[in-house]
Amino acid sequence: MAIAGRPGGVLRRAVAVLLLGALVPAAAARAGVIEQVQQSGVLSAGTRADSPPFGFTDRDGHLAGFSVDLLKDITAALSTSLKRPVRLDLTPVTPENRTDMIRDGRIQIECGITTATWDRLQKADFSIPFFANGTRILTHRRFGQGVEDLAGKRIAVVAGGTTRLAVVTAVPKAIVVEVPDMSQGMQLFRDGKIDGLSNIGIVLRGLLEQSDDKADLVMLPRSGAIQYEPLACMLPREDSAWHDFVDRVIATELKGAPDYNGRYIELYNTWFGAGSPLPMPLDHTVIERLVHAAYWID
């Protein structure tokens, strides 16, 4: 019995060694973002370069905007927590590649105009919301005064985004055209190849203000929105420590916001306050929703 058992014992040990060899690199690959940053001193982040004022390329060729400032605050908080300098390494992302870049580990966080969807949640996690806005449609005044007047019109949406469903639901007879980004969509709009664009209202406001034809344009619906959009940072899946850290930074910044005090208000006023490139009063209902998502903050 003892001799007969030896081959089985050897086989079991061999299998155990092989399994251990396979598991060691897998465990290393699963090192959390905080541990990775502790070792490297670098936080790899992504944001859009075509979505002012959230993310855009400034005159010096650097990424800037509301989302970039939020990423800088998260980086500073990491540096304080880890008691070492941390450098923010920013990479431009697109609607098509941002989720895969998170899943594949090419970036460790993405903050932009991104909303959670079931499909995206298969590849990434999401922080609590840091901004909220409503989806609307930018079009010519001559086409009508309500979204119901846009039946049969060609409405552009960014490929891979959540806006397509919002437009199809609000204007079932519209012709939805997918574009790579809003810049190309706006060019098609100027050339008369489409009849309108849809995105969150604040992005459309930016395009409207830059347009030479803004007197002839309108955002529909005139008030409200066809869909409420909470914007959040995308994070790697199954990294609870990093998820909790980012949530706490956002929640801490939101503290005091209902009274129009604190870091969040400072950031908001920089990019949306009076004298900013795109003034937009802070809707108190929206800020209440954001703060409610962070109710657990000390």
Image: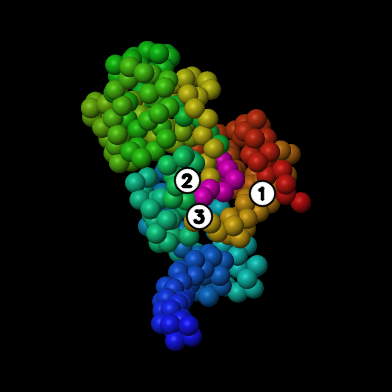
* Label 2, label 3: how far apart the Cα atoms are: 8 Å
Q: Is residue 278 above or below residue 172?
A: below
At which x and y percent is residue 185?
30, 35
Q: Residue at x 39, y 51 (%)?
A: 98
Q: Earlier in the sequence, mark 2 or mark 3?
A: 2
The magenta segment is 125-131
* In the displayed structure image, the side of residue 296 where residue 174 appears, left or right: left
Residue 248 falls within the magenta-colored stretch: no
What amino acid does circle 1 point to? Ala
Q: Amino acid at mark 2?
A: Leu
> In the structure shown, which secondary structural element does the residue marked by tag 2 occupy?
helix
Give amino acid for label 3. Arg
> Mark 2 and mark 1: span between their CA atoms?
21 Å
Name the residue carrying label 3.
237
Q: Mark 2 or 1 closer to N-term?
A: 2
Name the residue that disc number 2 marks. 121
Residue nearest the viewer, comparing 103 with 249:
103
Q: Would residue 164 be visible to someone looking at this image?
A: yes
